[in-house]
Amino acid sequence: MRPTTAWQAMVQSPLSFLTSSWPWRSLGYLAGGVVAGAVVTALLAVGLAAGLVFAVAVVGVAILAGVVLGSTEVAALERARLRLVDLDPVPDPHRRPETPGAKAWITSRLKEQVTWRELTFTLISAAALWWLDLLVLLFSFGLPAVLIASIDGETWLWTVFSACVLLASPYTVTSWAGARAALTRTFLAPRDQELGEELREVRASQARLLDSFDAERVRIERDLHDGAQQRLVSLGMTLGMLRLDTPPDSPQSGLLAEAEAQLAIAQQELRALIRGLNPPVLADHGLVAAIEDYAGRFPVPVTVDLVLPARLARKLETTMYYLINEAMTNIAKHSGATSATVHGRYHSDLLILEITDDGHGGVDAEAGTGVTGLADRVTALDGRMRVSSPVGGPTLLHVEVPCRFA
């Protein structure tokens, strides 16, 4: 496994580590820490001193606020520098202000907990971290250089000691660089609650999208039923009246018969479309009856073994219906299966669903196929989905969705 941190590189292969770029990256990380730390310490000292001197005036408060906000830039620099010894990027935990403008940005930053955590890290870095960086570098390189320059031939033990320190310097430097990086990541990486808030927003957005899709589907079904279907019925009546006035043996009679046949096909397809958009059996009898009805009309033989203790909530029921519908459509289009099974049970507040087919398999859940749409539906319900589809089949789609009955 390719190492992603300096620590991993040193532990996995201590000898080849010496010929890799990791010791040099660690050296650059600590040297940059010394330079950045010295500059930040100087600016921080000036800012704090000026803020305290002018604390009685408004300008002092503004200076202290600037120190706090400046810590966010220090944190951004440290996140960027961290890539030298830790290849896993640290995302910016700050949220985008709700409104544009400097005032909104300042207000948003001062209210965020992460800003004060970054200020704490900046103070720790100024008070200790860059000094430790400097001490490690001085011990690893400065001390041996001074000893070698000052010793004479009679103090050969110091020469050996200096050589040992220099030989160990890659490990010394990398060890502290790894520890410093771990501390930096602890302070500056997004916390669980910050990520959790973003995830809650994403899930809420997905739920709103599902609701809007359901509402739009109902609207389309109503428009088709009250609009296009009624016009087709009216057209059928008009053709029927024309047939009454047309001689049976005339050329127009044949054309009317063909038009009526095409109209009957269009009406049949429109009814199937309307039934698929908002199936009455789902609204009247629930998910089990709706799936059994759909399976009865499916081109591939489907065994339905779906047992639920009661009706599901409307939103969950509708979403699960279209999830099963889409999964079965994928089977008919892509799998080459001769049979399929829909198995579902309720257990420990989970609706567990398994859809299997005996097709040729080879479904790649990461390739952006129809499985992606199924995963999006499951994620919006706070559920999880797994796909097992070896080449040659069979294919198993396993879905678990939180579900509670009153």
Image: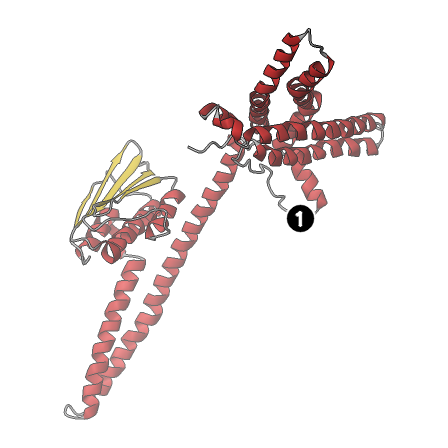
Q: In this view, does 361 lie above or below 196?
A: below
Residue 239 or residue 325, whichever sits in front: 325
Query: Compared with residue 232, is residue 4 higher up or lower down, i.e. above or below?
Result: above
- Residue at the spot 54% in from the left edge and 34% down from the top edge: 194
Judged left or right of residue 323, residue 211 is right
- Identified at 34% across, 62% down, the residue is 221
Q: Where is residue 18 in the image (x, y as percent from the top left)?
A: 53, 26
Where does label 1 land, which residue?
Answer: 100
The residue lying toward the viewer, choosing from 13 and 279, is 13
Identify the residue at the far front of this view: 153
Quick check: can you spot residue 173?
yes
Q: Residue at x 63, y 33 (%)?
A: 78
Quarter of the image where one finds residue 127: top right
Q: Label 1 crowding class (10 Å Cα cut-off): few <14, some 14-19, many 20+?
A: few
Question: Which amino acid type corresponds to the residue marked 1 in the rendered image?
Answer: Pro
Q: In the rendering, at what x and y percent does residue 191 appear?
A: 54, 30
Q: Is 180 or 155 nearer to us in this picture?
A: 155
